[in-house]
Image: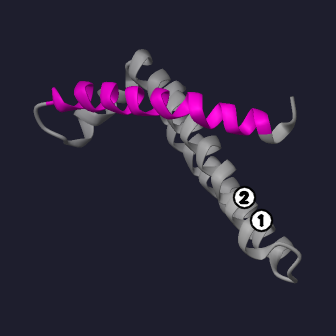
Amino acid sequence: MTLNTFKWIYQRISTPLIIILSLLLFLKAYRIESYDYENIYFFFKNKNNLFLFIILILLSSYHTSIEVFHSIHDYFYKSKNENIIKYFTIILYIIVLISFLIFISRFIF
């Protein structure tokens, strides 16, 4: 199985999982009476909610990165800017990942 086939299969499998996780977290968050800092903090302090949120973010990030890099390849193939755009996109994904890790570290430790 080639890498592109794996990516295609992953996107087909991850789409319903992302939708289900989104709906599940939405329904759990919908039950919160007021969305002040303490309630949101306790929502994510719950290990089940935090675990579902982490899985949702990781699945969504990888799912979108596949499509983003595929689009970059389609539109900028063999151009001077293709590598620059790919590196810039990787840097943006690293920034998002670091900010996500900072966010969840507040609830894990």
Residue type, label 1: His
Residue 55 pos. (x, y %): 54, 28
Quarter assignment of residue 70: bottom right
The percent coordinates of residue 42 (x first, y second) are 31, 26
Q: Which residues are magenta?
A: 5-32
Q: Quick check: marks 1 and 2 in contact, CB under 8 Å?
A: yes
Q: Residue at x 76, y 33 (%)?
A: 6
Please identify the quarter of the rendering in which residue 3 is found: top right
Q: How is the image coloured?
A: one colour
Q: Quadrant of residue 8?
A: top right
Q: Which residue is mark 2?
A: 69
Q: Residues within 10 Å of mark 2 (few under 14, many from 20)?
A: some
Q: Compute the Cα span from label 1 to label 2.
A: 6 Å
Q: Which residue is mark 1?
A: 73
Instruction: Report the front residue among 29 and 86.
Output: 86
User: Which quadrant is home to the N terminus?
Assistant: top right
Left or right: residue 61 versus residue 33 is: right
Residue 52 vs residue 27: left or right? right
Q: Which mark is residue 102?
A: none
The residue located at (76%, 73%) in the rendering is: 85
Q: Secondary structure at mark 2?
A: helix
Whether 64 is drawn above or below 106: the answer is: below
Instruction: From this view, report whether residue 11 is shown above or below residue 75.
Output: above
Q: Residue at x 37, y 19 (%)?
A: 46
Looking at the rendered image, the disc whose residue lies closer to the viewer, 1 or 2, is: 1
Compare residues 30 and 104 and report the one nearer the observer.
30
